């Protein structure tokens, strides 16, 4: 039998991560569609699914060199896989970040983006309006490891600087926030983070890379729940941590040895989803704006919150840092918590479900569900009034969404 030659010094290696073609034209939609793993010898048009736990080594020397990080290549799908590589390389290009890592869920992304970089004794300043599980990481989990935190208000920028301590290592923000749709000025907080040498981590889940690129404003890390608008079709759970090379190096080490990796199947689905992100977001945003304008005129509604409505207190900021207003609308129904509950029960088409960013429009009533464990005062502090309804605007015909909401207003009187 012919003896296999060591391929360590030759390129490309059989096990090398396939080079993703970065589109030279540089336009978002083209990059999302045309950034793709190198074609295999089968000459497939769409990227195949690499459903494999591990990859073979050409010889012992190549295995050694791969483990020693002397050469790049796939070893085991907990570390990397062509599908996760394609997904993450595409996301990095769309977000304008140097490097990234794909995770099994949005929460895995939030957790490792902090846990990998923080040490006992460190302090975090986070905006008060962050996703419930991110609160749990800070309140319940990190406190076990002597990592402390303070909460600052998104709409009170002067409160942030006062909370900085000598051991403050990280800022964590979400913009727009869930569910109140408050914003933070990314350029301002980017400068504050730079001035104090603090890592700025932005959960960009609501905006997606199509609407807003926090790295452009100085964020060192951009985190995503890909489960939402990135998948956009309510199918898979996934996430990503993107950012500066030197930070992602630490996050990658942490992930490799703790294992919150994204499955190749979910990465394949999510990479395909990115191809249609721009067209989907254009439609989500157009319908959401139309719905917000319509709601403003309804007598059943106390107020409407949508970043691209001139009545939003941060309308100017939204116009500055977001391409469009996003796919989420919140409004306060007159009649408080009971009317809110009745309204949800009266909807016929809109789903009542614990997700957002789906093709199907979803309505939720945070005061009686996701945030019911908070006191009313705590809810009010993050903008959750008793009759607040959150709509994740889907891709159905806009007229049908309005028809369903109209009949639910009538039936919940
Ligand atoms: C803003 C935000 N961040 C993070 C997450 C967590 O993402 P996942 O459910 O993919 O773990 C969510 C989920 O709803 C979210 O809304």
Image (tube, rainbow, N blue to C red):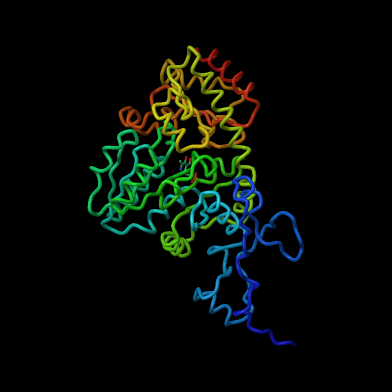
Residue 327 x %, y % = 54, 33
Residue 136 x %, y % = 37, 45
Q: Is residue 156 left or right of residue 184?
A: left
Q: Quadrant of residue 350?
A: top right
At horizontal 58% and vertical 59% (from top left) the residue drawn is 85
At horizontal 63% and vertical 64% (from top left) the residue drawn is 18
At horizontal 65% and vertical 49% (from top left) the residue drawn is 33
Residue 68 x %, y % = 49, 76
Q: Quadrant of residue 152?
A: top left
Residue 139 x %, y % = 32, 45
Picture layout, residue 318 above or below residue 25: above
Foreground residue, 366 or 368? Answer: 366
Q: Quadrant of residue 126?
A: top left
Picture layout, residue 297 above or below residue 6: above
How many numbered circles are shown? 0
Q: Is residue 373 left or right of residue 261?
A: left
Q: Is residue 324 left or right of residue 22?
A: left
Picture layout, residue 153 above or below residue 248: above
Foreground residue, 401 or 141? Answer: 401
At horizontal 54% and vertical 44% (from top left) the residue drawn is 227
Looking at the image, the residue that sits furthest to the front is 25
Foreground residue, 290 or 267? Answer: 290
Q: Quadrant of the N terminus?
A: bottom right
Foreground residue, 88 or 178? Answer: 88
């Amino acid at each position: 039998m012919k003896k296999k030659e060591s391929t360590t010094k030759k390129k490309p290696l059989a096990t090398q991560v396939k080079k993703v073609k970065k589109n030279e034209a540089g336009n978002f939609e083209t990059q999302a569609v045309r950034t793709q793993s190198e074609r295999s010898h089968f000459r497939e048009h769409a990227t195949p699914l690499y459903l494999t736990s591990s990859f073979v080594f050409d010889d012992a020397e190549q295995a050694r060199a791969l483990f020693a990080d002397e050469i790049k290549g796939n070893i085991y799908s907990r570390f990397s896989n062509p599908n996760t590589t394609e997904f993450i390389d595409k996301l990095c290009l769309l977000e304008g970040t140097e490097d990234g890592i794909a995770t099994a869920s949005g929460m895995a992304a939030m957790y490792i983006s902090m846990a990998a970089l923080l040490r006992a004794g460190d302090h975090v300043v986070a905006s008060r309006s962050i996703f419930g599980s991110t609160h749990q990481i800070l309140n319940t989990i990190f406190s076990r490891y002597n990592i402390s935190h303070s909460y600052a208000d998104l709409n009170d920028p002067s409160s942030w600087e006062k909370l900085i301590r000598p051991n403050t290592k990280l800022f964590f923000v979400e913009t727009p926030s869930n569910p109140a749709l408050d914003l933070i000025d990314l350029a301002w907080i980017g400068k504050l983070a730079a001035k104090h040498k603090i890592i700025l981590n932005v959960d960009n889940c609501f905006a997606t890379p199509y609407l807003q690129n926090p790295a452009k404003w100085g964020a060192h890390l951009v985190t995503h729940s890909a489960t939402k608008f990135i998948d956009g079709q309510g199918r898979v759970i996934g996430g990503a941590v993107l950012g500066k090379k030197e930070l992602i190096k630490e996050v990658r080490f942490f992930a490799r040895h703790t294992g919150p990796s994204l499955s190749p199947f979910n990465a394949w689905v999510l990479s395909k989803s990115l191809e249609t992100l721009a067209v989907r977001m254009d439609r989500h945003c157009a319908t959401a704006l139309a719905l917000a304008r319509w709601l403003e005129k309804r007598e059943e509604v106390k107020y409407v919150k949508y970043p691209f409505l001139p009545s939003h207190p941060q309308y100017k900021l939204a116009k500055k840092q977001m391409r469009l207003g996003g796919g989420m609308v919140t409004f306060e129904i007159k009649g408080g918590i009971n009317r809110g509950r009745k309204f949800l029960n009266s909807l016929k088409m809109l789903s009542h479900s614990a997700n957002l960013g789906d093709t199907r429009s979803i309505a939720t009533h945070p005061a009686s569900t996701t945030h019911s464990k908070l006191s009313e005062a705590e809810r009010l502090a993050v903008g959750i009034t008793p009759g607040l309804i959150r709509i994740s605007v889907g891709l159905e015909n806009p007229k049908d969404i309005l028809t369903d909401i109209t009949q639910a207003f009538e039936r919940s009187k």
